[in-house]
Image: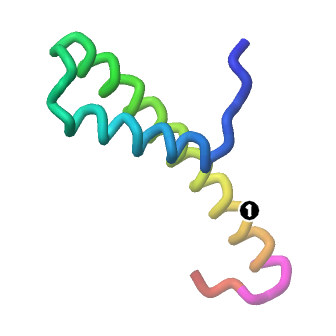
């Protein structure tokens, strides 16, 4: 089972994928694999950020300081 990477690690990997795709040096097949990996990473990052936002909102509500 693959160990969960940190958000920061996922963002760094996404940046590397973007650079590789932008280089124009990949074959179509390689590009599609990188793109698919990038989409999965972006979804994971989005999920992690949404979860963090929910936690912050919950904490702010508990403190009576919710204003988002």
Instruction: State the image coordinates of residue 51 (x, y, percent, origin top left).
Output: 65, 52
Would residue 19 be found to the left or right of residue 61 on screen? left
Residue 29, placed above or below residue 25: above
Q: Residue at x 69, y 84 (%)?
A: 66
Q: Main secondary structure of the magenta part?
A: helix
Residue hosting label 1: 55
User: Residue drawn 34% across and 24% down?
Assistant: 34
The magenta span reads 61-65
x, y percent for residue 62: 84, 77
- Quarter of the image where the C terminus is located: bottom right
Residue closer to the observer: 16 or 41: 16
How packed mark 1 is, by other alpha carbons closer than 10 Å (few <14, some 14-19, many 20 or more), is few
Is 8 positioned to the left or the right of 39 in the image?
right
Query: In the displayed structure, does residue 65 sit left or right of residue 28?
Result: right
25 or 13: which is nearer to us? 25
Q: In the rendered image, which quarter is residue 15 located in?
A: top left
Figure quadrant of residue 37: top left
> Which residue is located at x 70 percent, y 30 percent?
4
């Amino acid at each position: 089972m693959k160990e969960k990477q940190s958000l920061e690690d996922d963002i760094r990997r996404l940046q590397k994928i973007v650079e590789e795709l932008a280089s124009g040096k990949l074959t179509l097949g390689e590009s599609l694999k990188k793109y698919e990996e990038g989409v999965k990473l972006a979804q994971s990052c989005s999920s992690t950020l949404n979860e963090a936002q929910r936690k912050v909102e919950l904490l702010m509500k508990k403190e009576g300081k919710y204003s988002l």
